[in-house]
Image (tube, rainbow, N blue to C red):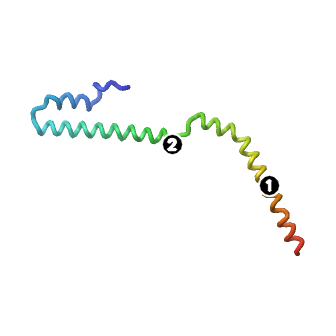
Amino acid sequence: MHDQTKQPWFQLCQLASVEQDPEKLLALVTEINRLLEAQETERDTRQRRSWRQTPESDQHQTAARQPYLSREAQSGTSANDTEERPASNSSEDSE
């Protein structure tokens, strides 16, 4: 984790803790708030991106399943072909 004492918002907090002028204090607190919100937004964006990415293990599993998926697709196609043949034969008989 980052050393928080080196963060700009932390340094501004130290200045704000001893500031006597209300206007300067308000300016410091406003800037601290802006920096922290920007940091939070950046963190949330990184989290959303990482949630959308497929983990490497899932990619390997998908690759490992590929031969079986193609077999299922082929068997599904052949089952459909056999069901369609009698229908097409019956239409040929009626001609």
Residue visible at 15% across and 36% down in the picture: 25
How far from the left and from the top, in percent, is residue 15? 18, 29
Residue that extends furthest to the left in the rendered view of this protein: 21
46 relative to 69 in the view: left or right = left
Q: Amino acid at mark 1?
A: Ala
From this view, report whether residue 60 is shown above or below residue 70: above
Q: Position of residue 89 (x, y in %)?
A: 87, 67
Give me the disc on residue 79. Answer: 1
The label on residue 52 is 2
Q: In the image, which is nearer the foreground, mark 1 or mark 2?
A: 1
Choose top left, top right, bottom left or bottom right for residue 45.
top left
| Farthest right residue in view | 93
Q: Is residue 84 left or right of residue 31?
A: right
Residue type at mark 2 is Arg
Q: In the picture provided, is 78 more to the left or to the right than 29?
A: right
Q: Quadrant of the C terminus?
A: bottom right
Furthest-bottom residue in this view: 95
Provide the secondary structure element on which disc 2 rests: helix
Q: Alpha carbon of mark 1 to alpha carbon of mark 2: how far?
A: 36 Å
Figure quadrant of residue 90 = bottom right
Q: Residue at x 38, y 25 (%)?
A: 1
Relative placement, left or right, of 71 versus 60 is right
Disc 2 packing (10 Å; few <14; some 14–19; many ≥20): few
- Numbered label attached to residue 66: none
